[in-house]
Every structure is written in C-alpha cells, then in structure tokens.
Amino acid sequence: MDRNITEFGAIGDGVTVNTKAIQSAIDQCATTGGGRVTVPSGTFICGTIYLWNNVELFLETASSVLKASSNYADYNPVDAYVQNAKSIAEKTNGGHFILAVEAENVSITGHGILDGSGDVFFEKETKHHPNKFYCFWPDGMSVVADNKNTRPAQMVCFIESKNILLNGITIRNSPYWTVFLHGYRYRIGKCKT
C-alpha cells in the first residue's frame, strides 16, 4: 500500500521538523504489510527515521528532499539499538539520519535527495586550529563545531538488514559516512553520493 508523508501532516517548507509525521507514515505502511512511502516535492526536515520490513522510501521527484535536522535532540540516542556505538576518536555521537535495524526488504529509491546537513556540524572557518581534531570535509580539513555533542554518525545506516536497495537517489552533505552496511549481503543500484 502507498502512503504519502503529507497525508500524515508532513510539510515540505524547509523549516518544519517532520520526524513524527514521516515515521507515522512508515510505521503504518509496515504494520499493514509494507509498501511505498512517498516523499513528494519539497524540503522535508526530520531527525532520525526508522525503516521497517517491506518498506520502500520513495523520493518522488528531483525536488523531493529529505533534510536532516540541525538539532542534536532530533537524533536517536547512542543506546537506541544494541549494535550502535559512538566514536570519541572521530567525534561522532551515534546518531543517524535513516536507520534500518534487523530489517528485510527495505529500499530508498526515486529521483530525490537525502541531505545530511553536514555543514551545520562543522566550524565555518577552515583555518588551522592547534590542538583540535580535524575531519576530512569537501573543502579540506574542518573542525567539529560542538565538542560536547560532536556530530551525527553514519547518515544512512543498515544494521544486520537484508535485501536492501538504494537506487536513483542523491546523497549529499553528510556529517560522517554516507551509507553504512553492517552485516548480511546487500545490493546497491545506481546511487549518487
């Protein structure tokens, strides 16, 4: 069965945080046997969302954007699932944008964009800072902006999941790794990072 996130109250204005609405669409889709959850045109801000069995997250058009929240409180805690961890050395807090944990037949497809809002988690200045930890970033080495909260970890994270498909989407602006596949075998279609 198909679900459109706007039917659950999601607003693609680039300001409203839509985590609950998007998760409700995914949850309802999964509890009725699975299907497609559609993200229409617009910029939909959200925190961590979980994909469940037999759910396809479909970014309908090239202007369908799921954008990660800049608020640390909108992400899963480090103890959200047993396999999770944070990295003190790499300054990640164990939060993720999209998660599938021990799920089957999950996919993210379509023509749109997953934007990790990575730029907000780094200092704007790139000049040398002595005694600071540097991260590789598109413009060179950068410094994590908040040493207490650090930065979210892997942007799209599949943990011990199987029958995974990523196809047609663009993944950009990640605060850490773009896609993390832990355990089981997987198949990746056309995906731009």
Image (spheres, grey):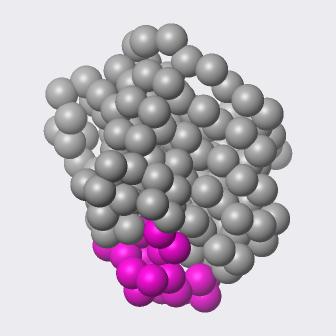
Q: Is residue 125 above or below residue 139?
A: below
Q: Would residue 111 be visible to someone looking at this image? A: yes
Q: Is residue 21 above or below residue 122?
A: below
In magenta segment, residue 138: no
Quadrant location, the N terminus: bottom left
Magenta residues, start to end: 3-22
Where residue 143 sits, quadrant-wise, is top right
Q: Is residue 190 left or right of residue 37?
A: right
The structure residue drawn at horizontal position 41% and vertical position 13%, both measured from the top left corner, is 183
Q: How many marks?
A: 0
The structure residue drawn at horizontal position 34% and vertical position 44%, both measured from the top left corner, is 52
Give the percent coordinates (x, y) of residue 158.
44, 31
Q: Would residue 51 be visible to someone looking at this image? A: no
In magenta segment, residue 18: yes
Quadrant location, the C terminus: top right
Task: From the viewer's side, name the closer residue of 109 and 180.
Answer: 109
Q: Is residue 188 left or right of residue 111?
A: left
The structure residue drawn at horizontal position 35% and vertical position 39%, both measured from the top left corner, is 53
Where residue 86 sits, quadrant-wise, is top left
Where residue 75 sits, quadrant-wise, is bottom left
Q: Is residue 12 left or right of residue 95?
A: right
Give the percent coordinates (x, y) of residue 55.
44, 47
Task: From the viewer's side, name the closer residue of 145 and 11.
Answer: 11
The structure residue drawn at horizontal position 48% and vertical position 74%, both measured from the top left corner, is 5
Give the percent coordinates (x, y) of residue 167.
71, 39
Task: From the viewer's side, name the closer residue of 192 and 40.
Answer: 40
